[in-house]
Image (cartoon, rainbow, N blue to C red):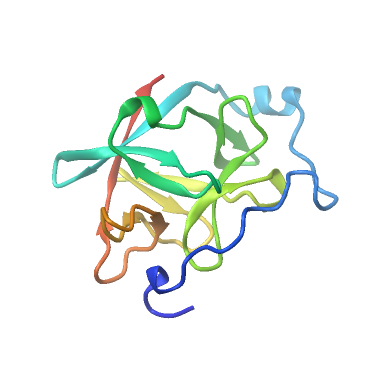
Amino acid sequence: MSNNPADSSPITDFPPATKGASSAPDQATLLAAGPSGFFKLALYHQGLRLGWLGQNNSEWAILVANENQALTLENYPYNNVTYYRVKGSDRYMSVSKNAYIGFYGWLYASGFTLSDGHLVSDYNKQKLSLYSKDNGYLYAWDGQDYTVLKVKFEAA
């Protein structure tokens, strides 16, 4: 990967949830792991709300300006890791090899940790960020030229 993930665009959709041998945990296991609720992720920089986490037609995470376009997510704790699932689907927030955030099937899901208002990928230890509003994609990358975002969980 180059030093700038935005130099390479995402080129394929994520694989289906049924690919591979692993499957999502059953409901009883999830209930034992902790409560779940529905929310939207509002994205902020320097105290100003820039928008919400949404997705494009290829299931890549993007910044959306209108709350009606925001994804509704649910907390999905499992084995002491917090995952985020798109409400009513089998798609989980994760990070591609080139640091783009997107929505994978369970086999490819990765966890996230909330730290001081920042959402940090367990996969690459990078914070949720935006390269530019023109680009619109969301990344797990806190390198130079990226705007690291704070998140607020808003009830959906």
- The image quadrant of residue 33 is top right
Across and down, in percent, residue 116 comes to 29, 45
Instruction: Tell me the residue at 55%/51% (across/down).
Output: 94
Left or right, 134 with reference to 16: left
Q: Residue furthest bottom?
A: 2
Question: 110 above or below 48?
Answer: below
Instruction: Tell me the residue at 40%/57% (across/down).
Output: 139
Q: Nearer the viewer, residue 67 or 120?
A: 67
Instruction: Tell me the residue at 45%/47% (across/down).
Output: 61
Across and down, in percent, residue 74 comes to 52, 28
Question: 43 above or below 134?
Answer: above
Left or right, 21 with reference to 11: right
Instruction: Tell me the residue at 73%/28% (across/down).
Output: 29
Q: Nearer the viewer, residue 119 or 73?
A: 73
Question: 100 above or below 28?
Answer: below
Q: Residue furthest right?
A: 21
Across and down, in percent, residue 8 comes to 46, 72
Q: Pick the quarter of the image with the C terminus.
A: top left
Across and down, in percent, residue 123 comes to 54, 59
